[in-house]
Amino acid sequence: MSMLLRRLSLLLLLCTLIATSHAQDGLLSPAEFLSYDLGSRFTRHHRVVDYVEHVAAQAPNVRLERYGETYEGRPLMVAYVSSAENMARLEQIRTDNLGRTGMAAGTDGNTNPALVWLSYNVHGNESVSTEAAMATLYDLANPNNAETQAWLENTVVILDPCINPDGRDRYVNWYNRMVGHFPNPNPDGREHHEPWPGGRTNHYYFDLNRDWAWATQIETQQRLPLYNRWMPHVHVDFHEQGVNAPYYFAPAAEPFHKRITPWQRTLQTMIGENHTRYFDREGWLYFTRQVFDLFYPGYGDTWPTFNGAVGMTYEQGGSGRAGLGIITAEGDTLTLRDRIDHHHTTSLSTVETAANNHEQIVAEFADYFTSASRGDYETFVVKGDNRDKVQALATLLDHQGIRYSYATGSTQVRGFGFGEGRTGSVSVTPGDLVIQTDQPKGLLAGVLFEPEPVLDDSLSYDITSWALPYVYGLETYALTDRLDAGTADAPPTLSTTPDINRPYAYLAEWQSFEDVQLLADILQHDIKLRFATGPFEMDGQRYERGTLILTRTGNDALGDRFDQIIRDAAAQHNQPIYPVATGYVTRGADFGSSDVSFLEKPDIAVLAGSPLSSYAVGEVWHFFDQQLGYPVTLLHADDFGSIDLDAYDVLILPSGSYGEVLTDERLGEVRAWIREGGRLVAMERGATFLAGKEGFALKRKEEEKDEDEDKQPEDALRTYAERERQAISDDVSGAIFRVQVDHTHPLAFGYGSTYFILKRGDDTYAFLEDDWNVGVLREDARVSGFAGAKAADKLENTLAFGVQNMGRGAVIYLLDDPLFRGFWYNGRLLFSNAVFLVGQ
């Protein structure tokens, strides 16, 4: 090489290094930062975090906030983006906006930019949205983009690039391992078929898009305080749907919840119409007003709507099947780049519409908190008889930002009783929890407590009833007037129990899930204990069935540690314990009686893996791991045939398909294990699989034939256009039913004569002939929510949950999910009874 060429090469290299250095000193596009074009591969979460941090470091109009981390330790964050002027007064904008809601006192009425919150990737395998989030963030941050900078003068954008990092990385890491150098768009290819459990859910297989109202998951628990600090005016939740579906955006489908205001409907339409300008120009297909309704309050569109925002879902075709590209039913290839473009476009179009209408948006938002209907009731009174349940409800209200107080005096009023289903006299007494709807979150409170949500259209995307009094099993009354009785911010303090030096035993009541937490703690310290199978009285106090009896006898080896372990556990779980000086009771069975059962620490196994429902497995896993804190062993379904069941006392079958798992041979081995003392807890489809199987008592109920069934009246003719609505006359869309309970059976210890379940289907099962029908549905059992007329009739006089004795063991049938989505609090004790008490 000549000297001239060497000098030219060095000069070019120097220019390249200088150019690269200058580029790294400024804001880089996603492609420049990641070294690949968006859409050419999926970006792992840590690189998404790196890029968002880069933008925040380089762009003066972007501020980053980490608001938490996932179960697997991945960071959760939002980026605030606005004009330089707005960023300089960001805290003032926030507090002034809270002033409009009544949640804080604002000081400057001129701070009125619209607040737009964009939430991406709540479902991990709907992974295109995080890629689109990076493109959107760059366009909003880019000072050379005159259009977006003009919008930001009138908006503050809060951008969450990934709500569900654990699920996203589960999908992305799997896909990146499956795809070759040349992505294969053939739908048969392995890269288009995720393995169990898929990437949709979070670490514990929970659907975070249905958790906004319940906050059972750590991601939601950390996000809600941040949301409540800002209370945005517009919230968008970005999703994906089936491969062959066009793009979906607002306005939403019916049914709309009746508390959604005309303005919220109007702004949805305005934003949707702005999207159509861009989609029409590009020739992109889309649809609106179908499938995705605004009724169930747990979604990322409805929950913000009940908090004053205009909440919307955007759905791109693709989801976990699409990968980098897939051939659709029409023969086209849907690419990741296509999907990014669509979500990127609606992201910016949303900001644009908010900017162009910011004054009206802010004014209507303020009006929402002064004039929107709070519902039919002004006050909800929750009786304080069960302290633990009331505290659990109060914790949920804290997550939601709903204010409450405690009654300090007594009064007599009239109200609708949730348990009775009718209006009558109500005695308000000190310690009762009081929720007034005349508060900033009053509309949300009204929605979460409403006894019977009004369903204008029977076709809904999710459950149709969720009233918190049924969820928590609390005696509650809804008052049409404001309660004027005196209230306090804290509940009455517990009266202390007398101390006894070296008591004969300690007693702990069995009335709530918190009592189960105490039991779990004590068992892990190898304390020997018993429980009462009947009520008893001593020292002038009555103790109900299930009461835990921790005697010094049997725990002598622990010495004084026995007392310390029990007292420490009681303090940790805030549970009262009652020391007694004798095992002699004034009424009932003495502690040495055969009516007082020994409670052995159980070794518990849970079946997991395909073809079981990942949601159902996750509910059980989360229950033991996060709620109860008790060890369980998850057995993979593929390995179940080689597992020695004798190592376990309890086997739990979550809902799922069991034909390939419980073969006739393996089912025979399970029956033999039960006869030797094993306890099988079968839930939903885990229970129904056993119906009619050899040795199992569960049977489907035979339908009674209507005498007029063979007749063909004119109204029996079917209309094709109404086929879906006609079909749901046989369905139950997540409705609440009243269960008649035999509370003398250990499966129902801690309950009264009534329990409320959430039914999500119309399968019916007959009463057990020679065993224990612990919970049954009788006539007119539906309490709230939609149940088709045929389905409601069919469910009369059917089994809800029961126990079959089999040899020395037992089978517990739970035909409806007591742990539904982790939020059905009152079911936790029922499930715990099945695991810890039945068959002991």
Image (cartoon, rainbow, N blue to C red):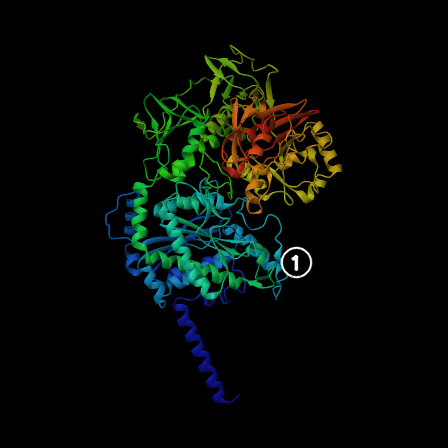
Residue 6 visible somewhere in the drawing: yes
- For the point 58% across and 26% down, the residue is 776
Give the structural element (helix, strand or loop) at label 1.
loop
Residue 521 visible somewhere in the drawing: no
Q: Whole-percent x and y of residue 751?
A: 52, 24
Q: Whole-percent x and y of residue 683?
A: 61, 35
Residue 362 as seen in the image, left or right of residue 632: left
* Rendered image quadrant of residue 768: top right
* Rendered image quadrant of residue 89: bottom left
Indicate whether 751 appears above or below 188: above
Q: Whole-percent x and y of residue 548?
A: 53, 22
Camera-nearest residue between 708 and 121: 708
- For the point 56% across and 17% down, the residue is 534
Indicate whether 651 appears above or below 137: above
Mark 1, residue position:
188
- For the point 67% across and 23% down, the residue is 769
Few, some or many C-alpha atoms within 10 Å of disc 1 (few <14, some 14-19, many ≥20)?
few
Residue 55 as seen in the image, left or right of residue 364: right
Q: Whole-percent x and y of residue 787?
A: 53, 35
Indicate whether 582 appears above or below 311: above
Count of numbered marks? 1
Amino acid beneath label 1: Asp
